[in-house]
Image: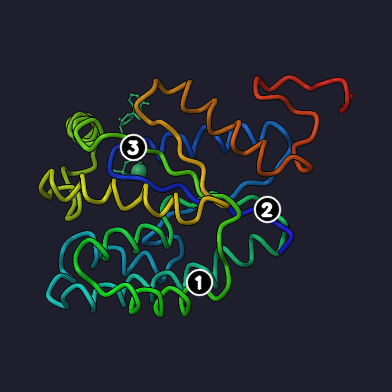
Amino acid sequence: MAGHFITFEGGEGAGKSTQIARLKSFLESRGKTVVVTREPGGSPGAEKIRQLLLSGEARDLGPRGEAMLFAAARADHVDTTIKPALTRGDWVLCDRYADSTRVYQGEAGVDGAYLKLLETAAVAGVYPDLTLLIDVPAEIGLSRVAVRSKTDDSGGPDRFEGEAMKVHQRRRKMFLELAREEAHRFAVIDGSKDLDQVEGAIQEAVLETFPEDLQGISKAGTVTEAAS
Ligand SMILES: Nc1ncnc2c1ncn2[C@@H]1O[C@H](COP(=O)(O)OP(=O)(O)OP(=O)(O)O)[C@@H](O)[C@H]1O
Ligand SMILES: [Mg+2]
């Protein structure tokens, strides 16, 4: 497909949403058309399923059933949002994708082979060109989320935020293992640095992954000789 597909992964409070907004501005200021989307959700059908998943209502289904709901949401998201955008040649920035299912539902005890089957069906061949794993110690991420809950209207922690520290630590480890196993598409970003440093590291990874598309654009945003 003509477009570019970048996914953002990491635990709660890692800085995914913040950095997606920054990367969007960076790409748009260079004339790119950017679609920002998120999981679970990202399309009208999938947003309905998101409510069930994040409120905890779907918990009665058990981890296997929940994983199926994530897959159903993803299939709709891929078909109605991601694939059309990539076909148009847009840049798609997605807040969580299949790796989050591998980690969150995997950590919850769902069999890896079963998750793989669901993933294959849901993504229908649409895999990210680049996955930015924003890595932070669980304590840092959760303390950021705690501050955020007090200062915005997010309504306090959702079903996945309100879990024990040990669980968050295991997920962090699983994300890092995934990044090692599929190093060809992952860039691990140190999310404990300040916002501008994280932004810079992300731009560097994007420029490295798509050199032809962003040729002549340096990390600082200045146009180099070659492009002028
Ligand atoms: N590098 C950073 N340094 C300090 N604060 C940060 C940094 N990155 C993000 N924050 C702050 O931490 C909070 C969480 O960031 P953000 O919402 O971007 O995280 P997230 O990964 O999208 O979290 P979630 O998984 O809960 O959606 C926000 O208030 C944000 O301003
Ligand atoms: Mg977020």
- On the image, numbered disc 3 is attached to which residue? 14
Which of the two discs, 3 and 2, labels the residue nearer the N terminus?
3
Q: Is mark 3 within 8 Å of ligand 1?
A: yes
Q: Is residue 85 above or below residue 62?
A: above
Residue at left offset 43%, top offset 67%: 44
Instruction: Check if mark 1's residue and mark 3's residue have beta carbons within 8 Å.
Output: no
Q: Amino acid at mark 1?
A: Val
Q: Quadrant of ligand 2?
A: top left
- On the image, numbered disc 2 is attached to which residue? 90
Q: Position of residue 129 (x, y in %)?
A: 61, 54
Q: Position of residue 25 (x, y in %)?
A: 59, 33
Q: Is residue 9 left or right of residue 141?
A: right
| Front-most of residues 176 and 25 | 176
Q: Is residue 221 left or right of residue 188?
A: right
Which quadrant of the figure contains the N terminus? bottom right
Rendered image: mark on residue 227: none
- On the image, numbered disc 1 is attached to which residue? 123
| Front-most of residues 118 and 73 | 118
Residue at left offset 78%, top offset 22%: 223
Q: Amino acid at mark 3?
A: Ala
Q: Amino acid at mark 2?
A: Asp
Which quadrant of the figure contains the C terminus? top right
Q: Position of residue 70 (x, y in %)?
A: 34, 70
Q: Is residue 145 left or right of residue 219?
A: left
Q: Report, in whole angstroms, how far the alpha carbon at label 3 lies from the one at label 2.
A: 25 Å
Comparing labels 3 and 2, the label whose residue is closer to the camera: 3
Q: Report, in whole angstroms, how far the alpha carbon at label 2 lies from the one at label 1.
A: 18 Å
Circle 1 sits in a helix, a strand or a loop, which is it? Answer: helix
Neighbor class of circle 2 (other Cα within 10 Å; few <14, some 14-19, many 20+) is: many
Q: Is residue 9 left or right of residue 35?
A: left
Circle 2 sits in a helix, a strand or a loop, which is it? Answer: loop
Q: Report, in whole angstroms, how far the alpha carbon at label 1 lies from the one at label 3.
A: 24 Å
